[in-house]
Amino acid sequence: MNLNILVLPGDGIGPEVIQEAVRVLRKVAEKGKHAVKLTEGLLGGVAIHKTGVPLPPQTAELAAAADATLLGAVGLPEFDDAPPEKRPERGLLGIRKAMGVYANLRPVRTYKALLDSSPLKNHLVDGTDMIIVRELTGGIYYGTPRGISGEGQSERAVNTMVYTRPEIERVARMAFSLARGRRKSVTSVDKSNVLENSQLWRRVVMEVGREYPDVALDHLLVDNCAMQLVLNPKRFDVVLTENLFGDILSDEGAVLAGSIGMLPSASIGERKASGVWTGLYEPVHGSAPDIAGQGKANPLGAIGSVAAMLEYSFGMKEEAEAVNRAIEAVLTSGRVTSDLKGTATTEQVGEAICRAL
Ligand code: IPM
Ligand code: MG
């Protein structure tokens, strides 16, 4: 195959973890005699520095031309006080929207070797294997009106949580289809006891659910879901939720796996004319500027994102499984970074994965 990939290293630890992810991608390609063509682009704080904006138009064009996009992380403390439109994060939201990647898949699973790194008791987390399907291009992240207006005691701020029926339908279909290849259970998460937005969400999810009679559907309110995630994480198979709830719940899910550095993500959009699914792949962790440049960052979330890319964008299931097995082997060997109580550097972990492959 020809793998035509855009790489957006971004800020903080982004470039370090992406370097190892690319190393693994090249290794997979070399073994399977696939041709990889990598293009690099600017996104986030680094893009603001070089071009004045967090998402240069050229980056969006490169993403549209590529088969898939691999992203590190964005965000730098120097922009903490900047208005939202001048922050690196706006670049991330912009590229997700520009690519139309509406379904963000965040698998949360435990590895035997990491059970002791989880803050929960081993017997509670052992066997956890869920995938959070987070709606990614709608909801309160993008809704208008938005903004801060007025002065003094009249100062007020507005954000708008808005979903249309088609936006809910397409992400729900994604969740149900995924569930069919797993344990056939979808838990939809909302706040329908308070929000009209969630009432529509629940109603549309139930309607879509009727198209999948073989998949069980239940509903949880988001506050209760936050609690169930730590009380009984094994009860979850596919968790379907809107953008902001998914953002919050997936960080909670991340610690179940031992470290947020472990979590990959895949954001999927429409199928292109070439037959390849539009996909943006990024680790769930942030740019962690406090440890950037020190070789301490865990690259396994980024490397897992390469596995997700192989699987979802290119349908290379075997290669994806090989990468995931290599991750498991390296975890068992103990050659891991300090977030997992190891002493290896970012680069050593990447090298170990390549050897395991
Ligand atoms: C994530 C991140 C982003 C989000 C930030 C960096 C804008 O927290 O991908 O979970 O909120 O979507
Ligand atoms: Mg987040």
Image (spheres, rainbow, N blue to C red):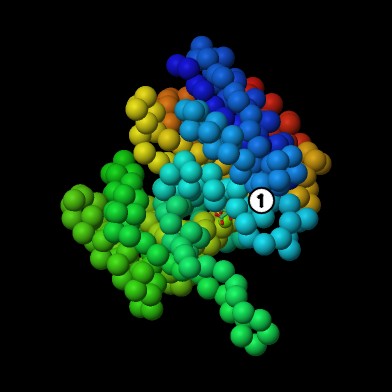
x and y percent of residue 270 in the render? Answer: 36, 39
The residue nearer to you, when weighing 226 against 149, is 149
Q: Residues within 10 Å of mark 1 (few under 14, many from 20)?
A: many
For the view shown, which residue lies furthest in the top direction?
33
For this view, does 143 lie left or right of residue 238? right
For the view shown, which residue lies furthest in the right direction?
294
148 w.r.t. 166: above or below: below
x and y percent of residue 187 in the render? Answer: 34, 59
x and y percent of residue 253 in the render? Answer: 52, 57
The residue nearer to you, when weighing 142 against 37, is 142
Quadrant assignment for ligand 1: bottom right
SS type, badge 1: helix
For this view, does 221 lie left or right of residue 218? right
Tell me which residue sits at (50%, 46%) in the image: 96
Tell me which residue sits at (50%, 15%) in the image: 34
Residue underneath mark 1:
88
User: Where does the N terminus fall, quadrant-wise?
Assistant: top left
Is the CB of mark 1 within 8 Å of ligand 1?
A: no
The residue nearer to you, when weighing 200 against 260, is 200
The residue nearer to you, when weighing 8 against 17, is 8
For this view, does 289 lie left or right of residue 24? right
For this view, does 339 lie left or right of residue 132? right
Tell me which residue sits at (53%, 33%) in the image: 61
Tell me which residue sits at (41%, 48%) in the image: 103
User: Where does the C terminus fall, quadrant-wise?
Assistant: top right
Image quadrant where residue 317 sits: top left
x and y percent of residue 30 in the render? Answer: 57, 14
| Residue 259 visible, this angle | no
For the view shown, which residue lies furthest in the front direction?
150
Please name the amino acid that badge 1 sits on. Answer: Pro
